[in-house]
Amino acid sequence: MPRYHFEREARTPQSEVFVVTADEKEIGRVDVHYGEDAVHATLCIPDDFSEDALQELISEVDERLVMSVQPFREDFVVTVWMGRQAGVYSEDYEEDLEDEVEGNGHFE
C-alpha cells in the first residue's frame, strides 16, 4: 500500500486543489468542492490504476482531506478521470518562453 501525500496548490472558501504523490512520485490531482450537505471531488489518476488502488485513494482523500474540513457532510461524490498528463499550461509560463525564444514565435 503506497503512502499518499497531498500537497495543496490552491484554496478558496469552498474548494481546494491538491497534487497527489505516492512514493515521492506525482500520480495525480484532486479538486475538492465543499457544499452545504455534500462534498464533490474530481480525481485525476493514471489509466493503469487498479480498482483496489482507486478505492484506497478515495478513502484517503475522504479521511485525510474531506473529514478534516467537513466531517458532518451527508455525501461525498467523486468523479474519476483516468488518463495521462498532457502538460501544464499557463499564460505566465508562455510569456516567459516567448521572452526566451528570439524571433521565431515558437515554444521549444
Image: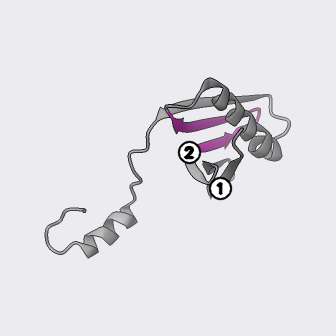
Earlier-in-chain disc, 2 versus 1: 1
What SS does tag 2 mark?
A: strand
- Label 2 amino acid? Ile
Most extreme residue toward the right, as rendered?
A: 72
The region drawn magenta spans: 28-46
Q: Is residue 27 above or below residue 59?
A: below
Most extreme residue toward the left, as rendered?
A: 104
Q: Within 10 Å of the Cα at label 2, are there few (<14), some (14-19), or many (20+) other Cα atoms? A: some
Residue ID for mark 2: 27
What SS does tag 1 mark?
A: strand
Looking at the rendered image, the quarter that the N terminus falls into is top right
In this rendering, would 105 be left or right of 12?
left
Determine the image quadrant of residue 102: bottom left
Residue at image x 81%, y 41%?
67
Q: Nearer the viewer, mark 2 or mark 1?
A: 2
Determine the image quadrant of residue 101: bottom left
Which coloring applies here? one colour
In this rendering, would 94 be left or right of 31?
left
- Label 1 amino acid? Glu
Please provide percent x and percent y for residue 106: 19, 62
Residue ID for mark 1: 7
Looking at the rendered image, the quarter that the C terminus falls into is bottom left
